[in-house]
Image (spheres, rainbow, N blue to C red):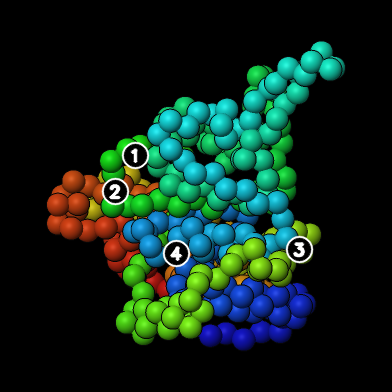
Amino acid sequence: MEETTSRIDLTGFSEKINELKKCISEVVVGQDKAVDLILTAILANGHVLIEGVPGVAKTLMAKIISRLIDADFSRVQFTPDLMPSDILGTTVFNMKTSSFDFHRGPLFGDVILVDEINRAPAKTQSALFEVMEERQATIDGKSYQMGELYTILATQNPVEQEGTYKLPEAQIDRFLMKVTLGYPSLEEEVAILERHHEQAEFVKLRNVKPVLKKEELLSLRELTRKVYVEPTLIRYVALIIQQTRTSKSIYLGASPRASVCLLQAAKAFALLQGRDFVTPEDIKFVAVPVLQHRLLLTAEAEMEGYSTAKVSQRLIEKVEVPK
């Protein structure tokens, strides 16, 4: 991997990131790649969709990361009967002032955990869609702006489909990444059992202290813009995206938004590694999580048992890596 003199002072930042990862590892065993990806997405100012079967620590992962950032956190459990006013808030008449007061819902905050996002109906999803894209909510004709840090961490179960609604493609496209949490390895499972046997109870999240202040995170987001990207790597990103549009296995390829997201994520991941320049390995690391939820496979590819993640990986490998 190429070495260069850093043009950005990353000393303090690296210490903070290492501390963040250490705190997360004390609560969540394994899932190192998922942790890196979620932190990358937050640095890149993007929303994250976390997918996995029940019991693989999706909600726990989102909770611990949000607790380690000193910002306003709220959690919403999506259900089939959830209405837009339940998440955005309502206007209530104040008898004392003879005026209407707006009572903010749980979608107002800095870091929002949306649990089981695919359980809410279309009306509620459309309300969430505006907040994700515009970072604002419109209630009774009035717009309310969200904060600069605004980030949504959403979870969904890919197996159970009863009582769920398929997310529209346009909304899925607003997630910077889709991070898949798999089952732990044998060694990791043993470590989980030993930890719970010794402690006899789950780690209490209320005891977790913030590591990163809101202002620090915002300044780190500014640093990602200064991360250097060689022109050959910008072309490399474009070639990967072009592959998704010409593949016979893909019905709907990635849009220009996907290429912007891929570049943005690669820059954030490079910063997370303590570098101020992007390498081809950075792009490869974030490519599948950035692309897999944006692609639609052809019926033939689905019948052959392919997944969007597998097809994405295959397409990335076909593109020649810049020297």
Q: CA distance from mark 4 to mark 2?
A: 17 Å
Q: CA distance from mark 4 to mark 1?
A: 20 Å
Res 96 → quadrant: top right
Along the polypeptide, which appears first: circle 3 or circle 2? 2
Crowdedness near tag 3: few (<14), some (14–19) or many (≥20) residues, C-alpha within 10 Å: few
Along the polypeptide, which appears first: circle 3 or circle 4? 4
Left or right position of 220 against 315: right
Residue at image location 70% in from the left, 21% down from the top: 92
Residue at the disc numbered 3: 213
Q: Residue furthest right?
A: 97
Residue at image location 36% in from the left, 74% down from the top: 184
Tell me the amino acid under the disc marked 3.
Lys
Q: Nearer the viewer, mark 3 or mark 4?
A: 4
Residue at image location 40% in from the left, 42% down from the top: 118
Q: CA distance from mark 3 to mark 1?
A: 36 Å
Horizontal and vertical percent for residue 157? 36, 52
Tell me the amino acid under the disc marked 4.
Ala
Q: Residue furthest front?
A: 200
In terms of secondary structure, where does tag 2 sit? loop
Check whether the beta carbons of the residues at disc 3 and disc 1 lie within 8 A of each other. no
Q: Nearer the viewer, residue 136 or 71?
A: 71
Crowdedness near tag 2: few (<14), some (14–19) or many (≥20) residues, C-alpha within 10 Å: few
Check whether the beta carbons of the residues at disc 3 and disc 2 lie within 8 A of each other. no
Residue at the disc numbered 4: 57
Residue at the disc numbered 2: 160
In terms of secondary structure, where does tag 4 sit? loop
Crowdedness near tag 4: few (<14), some (14–19) or many (≥20) residues, C-alpha within 10 Å: some
Along the polypeptide, which appears first: circle 4 or circle 1? 4
Q: CA distance from mark 1 to mark 2?
A: 8 Å
Q: CA distance from mark 3 to mark 2?
A: 37 Å
Check whether the beta carbons of the residues at disc 4 and disc 2 lie within 8 A of each other. no
